Image (spheres, rainbow, N blue to C red):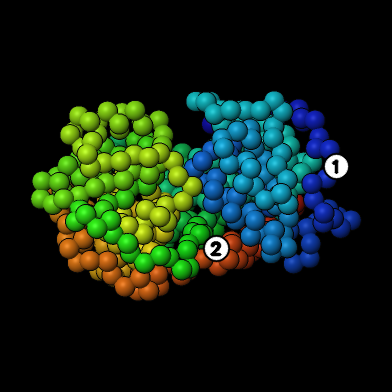
Amino acid sequence: MSLCHPVPPAQPPVQGSIWVSGRDGAGLPPAGGQAQRILICCHDFSRGGTERIAIGLARHWVDAGREVAFLCGTTEGGLRATVDPRVPVIELDPPIRRSLTSRLKLARAMAARLAEIDPDIIFLPGNFHLMLAPALRKAARGAIIVKISNPTVPSGLLAMPVRALLARFRDCVDGVAAMNSGLEADIAALLPGIAVRTLFDPVYLSHAPEPHAPAGEGALEIVWAGRFEPQKDVMLALRTIKALSERARVRLTLLGDGSQRRRVIRAIGALGLSEIVAAPGFVAGIDAWLTRADALLVTSHYEGGPAVAVEALAHGVPVVATDCSHFLRDIMAIPAAGRIVTTRKPRDLAAALAEVCKAGRPDAGALAALTAHLEPDVCAAAYLDWFDAVAAARAGKPSLQPAPPCA
């Protein structure tokens, strides 16, 4: 079975070129294979980490002299207004909103636009967008790079068929950006011969965080931040705080929103936690809460690079987390950074929180040093170096015509 989809008739063209730079007579990109034109393909502008990171990287790439554009199914989702005005946004016509089958439609519709847009790099900013690669490969002559942000293969019975399916994507992409060293090793083993590099997501940190300002009421202040979705396991956070409350005075603040919000609010009451758990909803930044926090709690089943943990460390706040991310093992390299708990038992997480909070907040400078390589300028430049290398490698191939269907 082929993973490539037939390309439908072309949609109405963009009014005028979105690019400033030209091509030479052969239609080649600038000399040296530089990735001058970068197209980011995303479904929409939902308020997720994938979209936020892509928007931030786009701004830095433009600052570095590259041309960047978004091609999206719809501009809905809440983050469209945060896109840099120098970055054009092309919305499909008609728009394609998320549904169970929307990525199949999205792939075909985006492929139909590639000839007129003609980017040097097509960047797929997360696992969710990997399904677009086969159709785009059939239509694109530019290089396709996909960012893998979470583990690609589930455990259990689904592992073998998913491995076989992913192996068939190897010829559809020119490179893979892995969010941490563990993912790079996993991908290299799963897809031998594919170009893969660890490229960290940028994290926008406060370089002068406010000093710790505890509430002064004697309770341990714990912060949890993320989407109220099954992946994040908010319910485990509640059960952990329930267990911790049996041995210490504690308060938990849940920052975020999502499809499980009503269930979480009901659970807070059912567990008798209404007096010690607050859920103020989505917030634009968590700095103010980290200033008061004794620890950050992460309860996810899996993560690529949880930015909230980096923000916490930059504020001098230790982290207690489930064993959900290679990335956390990469950066929590000293005991003062906190604890990674290998079980998902509330009492074990509660014990780790009690131990970390008893030790007190560590030196902020020591923790901030763990995250220096995640500065936005550093991360954006590393991406551009990788894009240039992949674009140059593809330009050196015998033909720059669209690749044959990937089987």
As drawn, which residue projects farthest toward the left?
A: 247
Badge 1 density bin: few <14, some 14–19, many ≥20, Cα 10 Å: few
**Mark 2 sits on what residue?**
376
Looking at the image, which is closer to me, 395 or 49?
49
Can you give x and y, in whole percent of width and height, for residue 290 in the image?
36, 57
Looking at the image, which is closer to me, 184 or 21?
21
Looking at the image, which is closer to me, 25 or 232?
232
For residue 16, which numbered disc appears in the image?
Answer: 1
Using the image, determine if residue 101 lies above or below residue 298: above
Q: Secondary structure at mark 2?
A: helix
Using the image, determine if residue 9 lies above or below residue 179: above
Which residue: 21% across, 54% down?
A: 217
Can you give x and y, in whole percent of width and height, for residue 29 in the image?
78, 58
Which residue: 78% across, 65% down?
A: 31
Can you give x and y, in whole percent of width and height, for residue 214 in the image?
28, 59
Q: Quadrant of the N terminus?
A: top right
| Circles 1 and 2: CB atoms closer than 8 Å | no
Amino acid type, label 2: Pro
Residues at marks 1 and 2, CA–CA distance in whole angstroms: 32 Å
Using the image, determine if residue 229 lies above or below residue 318: above
Amino acid type, label 1: Gly
Q: Is residue 330 visible?
A: no
